[in-house]
Image (cartoon, rainbow, N blue to C red):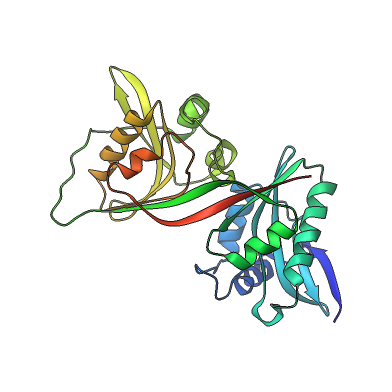
């Protein structure tokens, strides 16, 4: 068996999307992607296709590790091995090559997220030297048929203006890679909703979707009370709300629990100093 690596840029977006999908076959969540979705991720997540790694087994693409970079920080946007090549220790070799690429690119740290129940992946990353830095929560709320939550009326604002003007002040802890300003400013189709008290902006939410299924992409607030109030405002106009990767160590996160959200999944954020 011959094991080699090549850069993701050597494959077309069509081939990369197919490889990514096959590398996440039988995963906890559907890993199906398309060239269009992958192209959008390259932009919003700053994925570097010249540093992202494709695993070749006897010359055939058999795994992928997407590597993103911002200044001296690097992030893994997904790593997997195709079903027919699993169980051979190739994930460890792919991880080592991804780390090597991050170092060569000048990164000082490499981060990634992994589901807490993905024990096999956790072992691979821990052997490579990654350490858990915090927990990230997947939160979901559904409208109770008997309940009609009331909440404050929310205003609207330009998403870019909200991020540029208030992100730093309204986030008590560091945001995950996918919800950092660089990602938010390049993501299309965001809607900005605002909460004002006494004529002052106290919280904002960036959302996608519709009133049937609202996805909360970013929430910023002056404090936990303001966070709870803007969430109540969102609940007043939606049937369901999902928020992915809320930091468990944030002072804003308890606001979700106090208005009926439940934790449906958890991830570990892992970091490796390079």
Q: As drawn, is 190 to the left or to the right of 150?
A: right
Whether residue 111 is situated above or below residue 224 in the rendered picture = below
Residue 263 at x, y percent in the picture:
39, 53
Residue 37 at x, y percent in the picture:
56, 60
State the residue in front, 156 or 137: 137
- Residue 130 seen: yes
State the residue in front, 64 or 41: 64
Whether residue 229 is situated above or below residue 93 in the rendered picture = above
Q: As drawn, is 232 to the left or to the right of 191?
A: left
Quadrant for residue 99, please give it: bottom right
Q: As drawn, is 73 to the left or to the right of 153?
A: right
Residue 26 at x, y percent in the picture:
55, 76
Quadrant of the rendering where the C terminus is positioned: top right
Quadrant for residue 155, please give it: top left
Determine the residue positioned at 85% across, 48% down.
104
Determine the residue positioned at 67% across, 63% down.
123
Whether residue 246 is situated above or below residue 58 in the rendered picture = above
Determine the residue positioned at 85% across, 82% down.
1
Residue 143 at x, y percent in the picture:
23, 53
- Residue 50 seen: no
The mark tally for this picture is: 0
């Amino acid at each position: 068996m011959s094991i080699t690596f090549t850069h993701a840029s050597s494959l077309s977006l069509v081939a990369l999307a197919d490889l990514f999908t096959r590398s996440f076959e039988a995963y906890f969540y559907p890993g199906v992607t398309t060239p269009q979705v992958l192209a959008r991720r390259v932009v919003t997540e700053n994925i570097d296709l010249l540093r992202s790694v494709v695993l070749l087994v006897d010359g055939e693409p058999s795994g992928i590790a997407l590597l993103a970079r911002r200044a001296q920080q690097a992030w893994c946007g997904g790593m997997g091995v195709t079903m027919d090549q699993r169980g051979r220790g190739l994930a460890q070799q792919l991880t080592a090559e991804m780390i090597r690429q991050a170092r060569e690119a000048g990164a000082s740290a490499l981060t990634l997220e992994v589901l807490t129940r993905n024990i096999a992946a956790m072992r691979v990353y821990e052997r490579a030297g990654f350490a858990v830095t915090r927990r990230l929560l997947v939160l979901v709320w559904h409208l109770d048929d008997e309940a009609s939550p009331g909440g404050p009326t929310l205003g609207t604002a330009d998403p870019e203006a909200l991020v540029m003007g208030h992100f730093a002040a309204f986030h008590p802890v560091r945001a995950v890679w996918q919800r950092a300003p660089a990602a938010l400013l390049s993501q299309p189709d965001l809607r900005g909703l605002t909460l004002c008290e006494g004529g002052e902006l106290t919280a904002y939410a960036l959302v996608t979707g519709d009133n049937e299924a609202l996805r909360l992409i970013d929430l910023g607030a002056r404090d936990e009370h303001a966070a709870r109030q803007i969430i109540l405002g969102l609940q007043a106009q939606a049937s369901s709300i999902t928020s992915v990767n809320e930091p468990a160590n944030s002072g804003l996160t308890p606001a979700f629990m106090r208005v009926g959200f439940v934790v449906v999944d958890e991830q570990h954020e892992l970091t490796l100093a390079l």
